[in-house]
Image: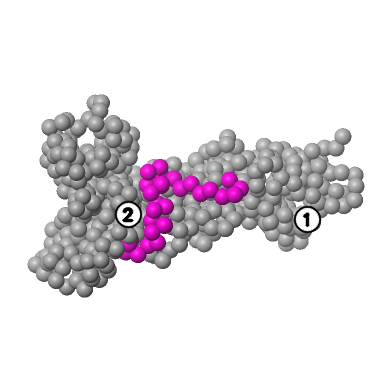
Amino acid sequence: MSRIGRTRSITLAGLRGTVVEVEADIAQSLPGFTLLGLPDQSLQESRDRIRSAARNAGLPLTRRHLTVNLLPAGVQKRGAGHDLAIVLAAYAAEGKVSGVHGPVFLAELGLDGSLHGPSDMVAMAMAAVDAGLPDMVVAADAVDQAALVPGARVRGFAHLHHVVHAFGGKPDPVPGVRPEALMVRPGETAGSPCRPDGGRRTSGAPLAAPEGVPDLSEVVGQWEARYALEVAAAGGHHLLLSGRPGAGKTMLAERLPGILPELDDRTALEAAALASLRSDGPAPTRLDTRPSFQAPHHSASMPALVGGGSGLARPGAASLAHGGVLFLDEAPEFDRRSLEALRQPLESGEVVLHRAYGTVRYPARFQLVLAANPCPCGYGEGSGAQCRCTVLQRRRYADRLSGPLLDRVDVQVTVAPVTGAELGSPAGAEASAAVAARVRAAVGAQRERWGEANGRISGALLRRGRFAVPPAARAAADAAVDAGWLSARGHARVLRLAWTVADLRGATVPAAEDVDVALHLRRRHDEEAAA
């Protein structure tokens, strides 16, 4: 009976990973290499790549027929990250190495035997730890990425020759390759979350806005819009900024990440894993707890915005903004189908992409900020004396943002142009650090009350039970429903806003004035819908 060599690897479908059992068997027959288990094209190409790498590592593969099976056989396997697991399973089938069935092997092989980290290293390491397999062997250039995952015990090697040595093999000397195994960042130091500046996370208010994030102190005037930004940040509410060109909509949106609270470790890790799935950017090597800011151009396609593409569906800007801000400037200019595709993640916090081979899910709990002009020419607000658009043009422009999409946007304000007097005396504008301190206090109250942001609480919880807003306090919102300009969903969103307004002023329950403020922040869309 022949010996079966076994190792483990990981294959991904979105951020969900499946443990792959790699089996290798050597038959007494003509030379050959058969790869089974639904491998994709890059894996099919691994046969010649693995043979060359093994020869250049000083331990050639068997000349007999080698059969490699990837289990579960019904799950498609993708990418070259299985190379190292396959070659070690083949060595184990020959009895040349031992102890290889314990760790997870995640590395690509070069023809010279060098090891290279796959682009989706963080996501694969996270899937391995979630599956209860924290021990992993990776390429030396991918150790920092794999070590981002808390609990991961990572060993990194630069060459297949080193890996063979580490698992009891005796390869022939290779010119130019040092004989000892090169290990980088051993497992006991792996998985410690750190900030981009290399320091540990600390509590207390920051002294300034995070490096590279614009500060609110640079915004002149715009007191109502600034307050709307603070409410949106404190409660996780989506935001629509409407106003003429140059009013400051983009300037305000760019400063939202500077007042948002830091990400928790799990969200930061998911954001890093999503970034690692995109091969068009640098691989993350530090766990960044700052909320991201994604601002795709209005010409972006639906796959670029929500995810997709041919073959393996990749995350789009909505998922890359997970835990942060998705800003759509000139929102009416976006393709309407792309905008409507955002309705699902706005409700569920994830993007679900259906493909012929299966369903891919990406987390996408972002804060949506829309910026829009009042009409195509941009000057239709107020008296509209400068507006050159017809009534039909203005209506068609407004209809590009559908009612169902806007109904999910809690805060909807008009950004008025800055006056000359405000430009002449810009003193007194609060810095982001001061606003962020109030936001953090409000977020802390919400987490203590019900474990998440006000913007995600169900309407039933806000109307019944011990957290119900008193009838006297919500009387104005009830009257708005009776008047027909506030829907049942809009009523729930007004109550959520009222809770956030109350949290910002330190109250334990919303009062009537908090509901009035919430109605003012919400009124724009609902009044237009009822008109």
Which callout, 1 or 2, points at the residue further toward the start of the chain?
1
**10 and 337: which is toward the camera:** 337
Please say whether residue 98 is one of the residues in the magenta stretch: no
Q: Is residue 14 left or right of residue 163?
A: left
Disc ID at residue 402: 2
Circle 1 residue: 51
Magenta highlight range: 330-358
The quadrant of the picture occupied by the N terminus is top right
**Residue sitting at 69 percent across and 59 percent down?**
110
Q: Amino acid at mark 1?
A: Arg
Position above or below: 172 against 490 = below
**Residue sitting at 18 percent across and 64 percent down?**
381
Can residue 240 be seen in the rendering of this structure?
yes
Secondary structure category for the residue under label 1: helix
Crowd around label 1: few <14 · some 14–19 · many ≥20 (10 Å): some
Secondary structure category for the residue under label 2: loop
Where is residue 245 drawn, in percent x and y? Answer: 24, 68
Can residue 185 be seen in the rendering of this structure?
no
**414 and 434: which is toward the camera:** 414
Kindly indicate whether the residue at mark 2 contacts the one at mark 1 (C-beta within 8 angstroms): no
On the image, which quarter does residue 193 sit in? top left
Q: Is residue 213 left or right of residue 147?
A: left
**33 and 301: which is toward the camera:** 301
Disc ID at residue 278: none
